[in-house]
Image (cartoon, rainbow, N blue to C red):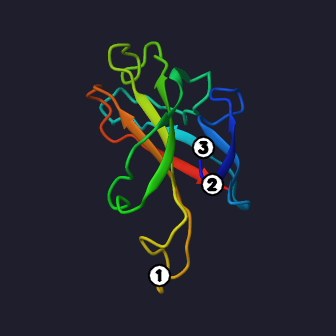
Amino acid sequence: MSGWTYDVEKPLDKDAHGLTLKNVAHDGHSFANEIGVAAIWINPNEDDGGTKHRPFVLCKDDFSLVGGIRDVKTAAVPPFNGYKLESAIRQTYTLKVIENDPVLGNEFFPLAIEQTYRFSKYGVDPPHEPSGQLPAARIFPYVTFSTFNPKIRRPQAIATAS
């Protein structure tokens, strides 16, 4: 990967937060110490029997891996689709069934979480500052969700970088 370097923390380690990148740099310039997902919050509706959920962390206590980390060739999604991407990595997880939970207790409707990191080339197109003269490389961390569970309508996540 031209210029990008990082260490990958093993997904589902007890202290990991999903697909976590550490010591991220581009062309020797430090970008981030760590990039990962802090937690996933699932808030039940009032009509789901008063069920309360804690934040779910992408670790072995809450999730199962679906395959391994994959290199993927994908385009950036709008509004970032003008960026030239050179590579991407992806990891998918499924939330473990929670027994007797009216929302998350159905094994036929698992919640899938997918983390993707897309890396752009070093360049000025599209510009990232007003003059359009300073080149930059970019990283795009995405968290996406999918489920057929009719009780999960708006899954949300908070990603952090430090």
Q: Residue furthest front?
A: 2
Q: Which residue is mark 2?
A: 161
Marks 2/1: CA–CA distance? 25 Å
Whether label 1 touches label 3, CB < 8 Å: no
Amino acid on which the number 3 mark rests in the picture: Ala
Q: Is residue 78 above or below residue 94?
A: below
Residue 35 in the image, given as x and y percentages of width and height: 63, 48
Amino acid on which the number 1 mark rests in the picture: Gly
Q: Quadrant of the C terminus?
A: bottom right
Could you classify mark 3 by the number of other residues whose Cα lies within 10 Å: few (under 14), some (14-19), or many (20 or more)? Answer: some
Mark 2 or 1: in front is: 1
Marks 2/3: CA–CA distance? 9 Å
Q: Residue 11 shows which numbered tag?
A: none
Residue 88 in the image, given as x and y percentages of width and height: 50, 43
Mark 2 or 3: in front is: 2
Using the image as rendered, state which of residue 75 and residue 41 is in the foreground.
75
Q: Residue 132 shows which numbered tag?
A: 1
Q: Which residue is mark 3?
A: 38
Q: Is residue 137 left or right of residue 33?
A: left
Residue 117 in view: no
Amino acid on which the number 2 mark rests in the picture: Ala
